[in-house]
Image: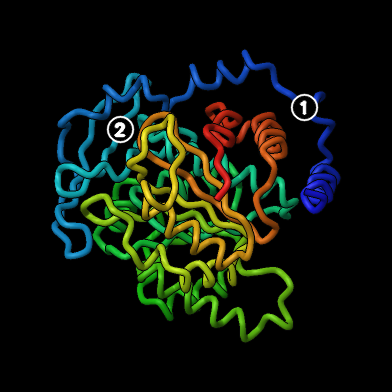
Amino acid sequence: RDGWQVAALLAACSTGSRSYQRCLRRSSELDMLDQQDPGRSALRGEWAVPGTVVFAADTAESGAVRVTGSGAGSGGHWRRLRFNESTEQSVLLLDANLHPRHEALAFGYLKSLAAVGSATLRCLGTATPWRVLVLGVGLGALPGWFASKAKASVHAIDLDPLVLKAAETVGSMPAAVSGTERCLEDAAQTGPALRTYCCDGVEYVAACAKSTKSTESTQSRPPYDLIVMDVFDGEGETPEAFLTEDFGRSCAAIASSCVVNLTCPVPMWEDAHAFNAPSCGRLAEALRSGFQSQAWSVRVAEGQNLIMAATRMGAPPEKYLKEASLELAKEEIFAFDPVRRVSFRRQDW
């Protein structure tokens, strides 16, 4: 806890923030954010419809990949990506000119990933621009949010080339670099930017960790400040390769912190643990093994998702995450209330 108090002080100094009470937004103002959020759940009826198919492909990695379009009440357009006609993968809001509106995150778990990830980096006092590795691209909603709203340098990875083609065609994501070695070379040479990579995420992280280990004597800061993992197969399950201790150690070798989205079968009013949510238990063990510290999680109010995170400094106290999210809300990077998301059903692992 003393370490987090020091980190909070350094973060306050580095951002020139005022005290907690002075930067506190009234709860009514945060409520207003949720009410005006262009990605709020009340608008689900606009995009959760059959729609018109705008992209279709069958892939070995994801199965049947379909993007459908429908109108938005704002005058723009919704784009919905699904696997095998059943697994909801991504939803993106476009303006009238078909440009992405990255402030709109239609899925609650994407909002929670953005809130927990950015508040954690603020707690750590991480220098900007943040360097973020996103595993799982979809149509580019979350990588786009970090790049455009948080002004981060973002590398986004997906295994499926046709999903990345959909992200490029529909979501205006940059064309992907392919192959682990080429992706690593591009990542090392590219300055602050939004880049997409077509390769195996586990292989990329392991190769990056190996490269980092060979240069760690001359590099005090890891290649990434944050890893954001939102990886699912065509059946909506997180592949086991992303839940191993080896993967956890590789993540800790290349990033100061990590935040992960998992589906959770446990009812919201019960605590999840290794027995009633085995994948969550395996992930917690992988993160503890890698980051050598306690992991923590929050639940997502809109559905059966659990957001788990870890840092090299351990689990930040809930108070500091709330303060950090309030600071960031004041800086207007969120179109929704982040405070409840960084603390909702908080659980330490």
**Left or right of 266 on screen, residue 299:** right
Q: Residues within 10 Å of mark 2 (few under 14, many from 20)?
A: many
Give the percent coordinates (x, y) of residue 299: 47, 37
Mark seen at residue 309:
none
* Location of mark 1 (residue): 23
For the point 65% across and 50% down, which residue is it? Answer: 315
Query: Where is residue 27, by image quadrant?
Result: top right
Whether residue 141 is visible to the viewer of this picture, yes or no, is yes
- The amino acid type of the residue labelled 1 equals Cys
**Left or right of 99 on screen, residue 348:** right
Give the percent coordinates (x, y) of residue 193: 55, 59
Give the percent coordinates (x, y) of residue 20: 79, 29
- The mark that comes first in sequence, 1 or 2, is 1
| In the foreground, 159 or 346 | 346
Query: What kind of element bears circle 2?
Result: strand
For the point 84% across and 40% down, which residue is it? Answer: 16
Query: What kind of element bears circle 1?
Result: helix
Query: Where is residue 264, by image quadrant?
Result: top left
Q: Is residue 163 above or below residue 118?
A: below
Which is closer to the viewer, label 1 or label 2? Answer: 1
| In the foreground, 173 or 318 | 318
For the point 42% across and 59% down, which residue is it? Answer: 282
Mark seen at residue 78:
2
| In the foreground, 262 or 276 | 276
